[in-house]
Image (cartoon, rainbow, N blue to C red):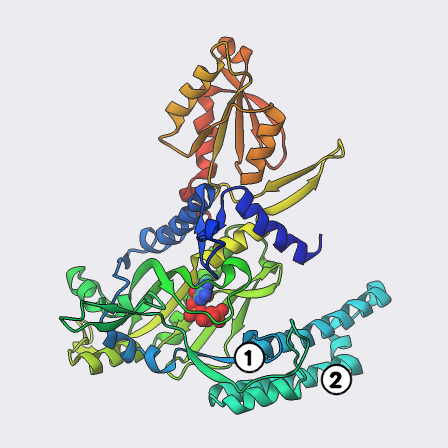
Amino acid sequence: MAQEDVFKKVVSHCKEYGFVFPSSDIYDGLGAVYDYGQNGVELKNNIKQYWWQSMVLMHENIVGIDSAIFMHPTIWKASGHVDAFNDPLIDNLDSKKRYRADVLIEDQLAKYDEKIEKEVAKARKRFGESFDEEKYRETSPRVQEELQKREALHERFSKAMNDSNLEELRQIIIDEEIVCPISGTRNWTEVRQFNLMFKTEMGSTAEGAFTVYLRPETAQGIFVNYLNVQKTGRMKIPFGIAQIGKAFRNEIVARQFIFRMREFEQMEMQFFIKPGTELDWFDTWRKTRMAWHQNLGFGAENYRFHDHDKLAHYANAATDIEFRMPFGFKEVEGIHSRTNFDLSQHEAYSGKSIKYFDPELKESYVPYVIETSIGVDRMFLSVMCHSYCEEQLENGETRVVLKLPAALAPVKLAVMPLVKKDGLPEEARKIIDDLKFHFNCQYDEKDSIGKRYRRQDAVGTPYCATVDYDTLNDGCVTLRYRDTMQQERVKISDLRGIIEDNVTITSLLKKLK
Ligand code: ATP
């Protein structure tokens, strides 16, 4: 299946099976805002649990908080968001469509990459077994030509971004002959900066209302609480604070479904360390976070690091973990070494000392910070895209199955009476009443067994148990496995033992190295 088709199918599957709905659907939706449905919320909660437990349960020195969305407006001045949380935007005068100038150029860079990969793929086919890929990349004039063009563009782009040179960004778009995907023309406006923060007013006008922002990241809530937590929790450096919560960004170009939303959720952990140890810790968290992703079993080849060339002025190392989405490798998580920038800024703007007293060194300092920041919704999208599968069956039918990691699946076990009479429904409900304390079960009696299996496959339920007439005599059910479709007769009393160990978040955590 072509990758664009996979993506389209995932989007419609999400709606059809209660995972994700456009927000305000009956009013024709609201741009880049989405609601999670009955299955989506379970999957999303499981992703959050996997993250939270891997941070807070698995590390003695990491604790969680839940800070407010509204914060003192000066926080966003101190963090740099009021002045510099901008995207460069450009409009096409013919289509009247607005784009992020940097994204247009990044897409162009990806086109060079694609050309190079196509050349290599062609050569691989032509030369067969004897193909020496490394040598070909170094010696093929065509590959070299594209590579040089790519490198030149990349260098020019990085410099323009580092210098915030908007005229140069526009010139690059002109020189590269980038066209608007809608109108196909090169009729571009100037590039302008656009602040991504949503504003609202707090307090009544009589009291004097003032502007507050909807937080564009959860991290600042951690920074301004770091000393509260350190003191009340008697935390010693190195230690971390984790938080899951909503963030809001007025994204200019909201596209690709839940990949880029205006209201989304982040899972962030700030790790406070002694200055000078940051590069070692950066390396540790880089590896730890990659292991967390790969533990889901989606294949190491579907992940890569993308180290940043353009570092924020305060950062001294940064990398993204990218996942192979149907529309290419895309950032799912960022890992940043942020020095003491944020804490020092809050010290300066609040006028309060937020130094840490190190009992071993017997000195005070502003800690350095390593941040890990992952979007719940992007993670959700990567899980859905990887799990969506269409299988050709022997009887010629196609089955759609979500091969979700069992620990993330919304429903773990569906219990189905073969018929809706003769005591079978009661027997099925008895099984659920017993097992529902241990994992999520669903009762399903409508339609033929075949249809019910398909329905459960489509939402990723790893196990189905069918109650039939024999069950009433032998205390056994037919257990059917989602991925293999194999069935076996098992005792009702064995169900919990067979299923529980494979479907809990604990089972995933135990596999983490
Ligand atoms: P991008 O370059 O894609 O805009 P970013 O580098 O600005 O992302 P960060 O500020 O590092 O993103 O945010 C950390 C994480 O939050 C990202 O890796 C991503 O998973 C998630 N995230 C950021 N913006 C959005 C958004 N608009 N919608 C959904 N998730 C987002």
Q: Tell me, for residue 99, which label it has, or none.
A: none
Q: Residue at x 53, y 41 (%)?
A: 17
Label 2 belongs to which residue? 145
Q: Position of residue 182 (x, y in %)?
A: 65, 71
Residue at coordinates 33% horizontally, 65% vertically from top-left? 218
Asked which secondary structure carries label 2, the reply is helix
Left of 307 or right of it: where is 121? right
Residue in front for this viewpoint, 149 or 506 = 149
Compared to residue 248, the image places residue 392 above or below, namely above
**Which corner quadrant of the figure contains ligand 1?**
bottom left
User: Which of marks 2 and 1 precedes in the sequence?
Assistant: 1
Crowdedness near tag 2: few (<14), some (14–19) or many (≥20) residues, C-alpha within 10 Å: few
Residue 252 or residue 236, whichever sits in front? 252
Residue tagged 1: 91
Residue drawn at x 68%, y 74% is 111
Between the C-alphas of marks 1 and 2, the distance is 31 Å
Residue 512 in view in this figure: no
User: Is 97 above or below relative to 160?
Assistant: above
Amino acid identity at mark 2: Glu
Q: Residue furthest right?
A: 126
Quadrant position of residue 122: bottom right
